[in-house]
Image: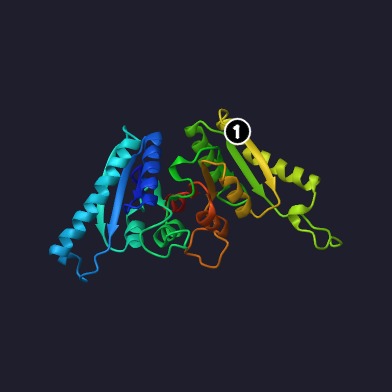
Amino acid sequence: MRTASIIVATDGTASSKAAVRWAAREAERRNRLLRIMHVFDWEWREDESSYAGPYGDLARKTAEGVVAGAFDLARRAAPQVQIETDTLIGHAASRLLAMIADADLVVLGSRGRGGFASLLLGSVSQRVATHARCSVVIVRGRGDTAEGPVVVGVDEARDADHVLETAFEAAAGRGCPLAVVHAYLPTVPLWVRGVAATDIDTPDEDAAEQSGVEETLAPWRAKFPEVPATITVSHESAAAALVHASHRASLVVVGSHNHGVVASAFLGSTGMQLLHHADCPVYIARPHLDAAAAR
């Protein structure tokens, strides 16, 4: 049986502190256990059991301080939430991927301690987001202070219903509207040259696309009548349309389907673009793979 928990990874950076606050509020909203995890690399010896010397003591105390600080942040952000903490040794991404296998949701900041300042997404966050077997939230952009509607990207993917369920639940829990974004490229007549697809006026195609989205939304509108949902049909790429929408959103929800060549990476190009460029937290909604396989 899987544990109903939300896991947040922390390393003491400003980005991870925002992730802790976001995760604590989400755990309180869902009445879930919050597990705070910190992983520190032990590179002084190959044997993990040999960190008992002075360097190991310092590393352990530093790690415990990071976790204690995160605990205090979470408690202030969500006074009623139940919290557990874990301090782990090893490579951060690998240990997190092993530990989050049974979680409902894992939350990370967008930047870590290492790497280059020019990178928009930390390597640990990227690896976890692309390989986790559960849903992942990357807290970025305006972070845990982001306000506005929940935005969801809708297409014809197999996981569309799960993505919409996640988005409607997120909007209902926050008491905010849902903004549904559907991007498609209209048919460009052969005689039209030098005109971008985004500049072509195609009212009939737009109406047909909107009608299709309305049909997809109908059961979810009925299930969540308290959530006002609007539809935007865009000629931009899905990534561009959702990045633009993120500037006025509190959360962007997308699916995890992958159209690339790396079968082990459970994230498509749209999700990856959002993880690098969105101006609010990004929710990668995926059914838990173990549960999906059991169906």
Q: Horizontal placement of 292 versus 237: left or right?
A: left
Residue farthest along the left direction in this orientation: 53
Residue drawn 35% across the image and 37% down it:
77
Q: Nearer the viewer, residue 58 or 270?
A: 58
**Residue 146 in the image: x percent, y percent?**
49, 41
The reply, left or right, for residue 237 in relation to residue 144 is right
Which x, y percent locates residue 79?
Answer: 31, 33
Q: Amino acid at mark 1?
A: Arg
Residue depicted at x 17% and y 62%:
56
| Rendered position, 227 above or below 156 | above
Q: Is residue 291 above or below residue 83?
A: below
Provide the secondary structure element on which disc 1 rests. Answer: helix
Residue that protrudes farthest toward the right in the picture: 191
Task: Return the x and y of residue 1 as percentages of the image width and height.
Answer: 33, 46
- Extreme-front residue of the structure: 117
Disc 1 designates what residue? 221
**Nearer-the-camera pick, 174 or 276:** 276
**Name of the residue lying farthest toward the bottom:** 46
Colour treatment of the image: rainbow
> Can see residue 52?
no
How packed mark 1 is, by other alpha carbons closer than 10 Å (few <14, some 14-19, many 20 or more), is some
Q: How many marks?
A: 1
| Residue 149 in the figure: left or right of residue 232 | left
The image shows residue 44 at horizontal and vertical percentages of: 21, 70
Of the pair 230 and 294, the residue shown nearer to us: 230
Residue 190 placement, left or right of 126: right
From where the camera sits, is residue 240 visible? yes
